[in-house]
Amino acid sequence: MTTNVLSELQAALDAATIAGDYIRDEYEKFTPIPNAPANISTAIDRGSQDLILQNLAKNFPNDGLCAEEGAASKPSDNGRLWVVDPIDGTRGFAKKNGEFSVMIGLTLNGEVVAGVVLEPVTMTYTYAAKGSGCWTKIGNGEPRKCSVRNETEIAKGILVQSHSRPGKESPPVAVLKPATVLEMYSAGVKMAVVARGEADVYVNTYGAFSDWDICAGHVLVTEAGGVVSGLRGEPITYGGPGFKQKVGLLASSAAIHQPVVEGLAAMEWS
């Protein structure tokens, strides 16, 4: 490993566990909101974020912090920045369909070097540190090493994406024509699905989204043997102006990445 961040990864796992236990308790009491809007935020998002940031600040007081729920950013003087989404896929939480996650990532000079995605309903952890591979476990169960799928033809592959409008094909599906389409909330879960070999490719066509939407999931995919880039193959870095990403996102196995980039070249997106 060029950067030993295993202690940081363990701290992220611990923080995710604390937040996950809190979220599960609140989830059980929560009344579903069937028509929850895409931009919904709840008091539980903020409660989860407080728990995570307190834990990280206690262990790494000199590190920077960047999190979704406002007024939580602390600049970094040492090149280390924790990037947190306390509930990624809050719409899935609000609809009570289980499609949400806790995402905690650590970047070093703009590169993500450790990440945890926790799915609280099942307490499924998918996590990675640079140079140490990607792993998954359920609760306190035995960890299993993750590897991406090796399908080379998207026509035989599995694409995971956000929920599309009923009866309307999304642009990536229209141009790539995968064999199977999975739909779910939470970019973190979608990237974990790719890392665990349960899908071949995840495409995000939003014109702009934030670092915390993808940071933790990025290292899962790369450590599982995959590739993460913009839709045209651009590199993804973190900590830019406003913590914004504007080149879309493609996370896939290495075997299928270039064919997908070429296929997406025909797609209009914004």
Image (cartoon, rainbow, N blue to C red):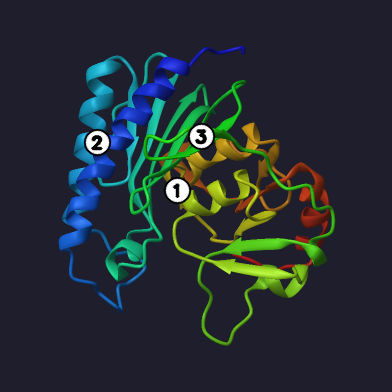
Horizontal relation, residue 114 to residue 229: left or right? left
Note whether residue 45 is visible: no
- Mark 2 vs mark 3, foreground winner is 2
Q: Which amino acid does label 2 sit on?
A: Ile
Badge 1 density bin: few <14, some 14–19, many ≥20, Cα 10 Å: many
Residue, disc 3 = 238
Disc 2 is placed on an element classified as: helix
Give x and y (percent) for residue 22. 20, 45
Q: How far apart are marks 2 and 3 (CA)?
A: 26 Å
Q: Which residue is drawn at 52% across and 80% down?
A: 165
- Mark 1 vs mark 3, foreground winner is 1
Q: What residue type is labelled 1?
A: Asp
Q: Tell me the tag on residue 18.
A: 2
The residue closer to the viewer here, 3 or 141, is 141
Q: Residue at x 54, y 54 (%)?
A: 190
Give x and y (percent) for residue 127. 49, 34
Precedes in sequence: disc 2 or disc 1: 2
Q: Quadrant of residue 200?
A: bottom right
Q: Tell me the tag on residue 213.
A: 1
Disc 1 is placed on an element classified as: helix
Disc 3 is placed on an element classified as: loop
Q: Which amino acid does label 3 sit on?
A: Tyr
Give x and y (percent) for residue 193. 57, 51
> With respect to residue 29, does 104 lie above or below?
above
Precedes in sequence: disc 2 or disc 3: 2
Q: Farthest residue to the bottom: give it.
A: 167
Give x and y (percent) for residue 26. 18, 55
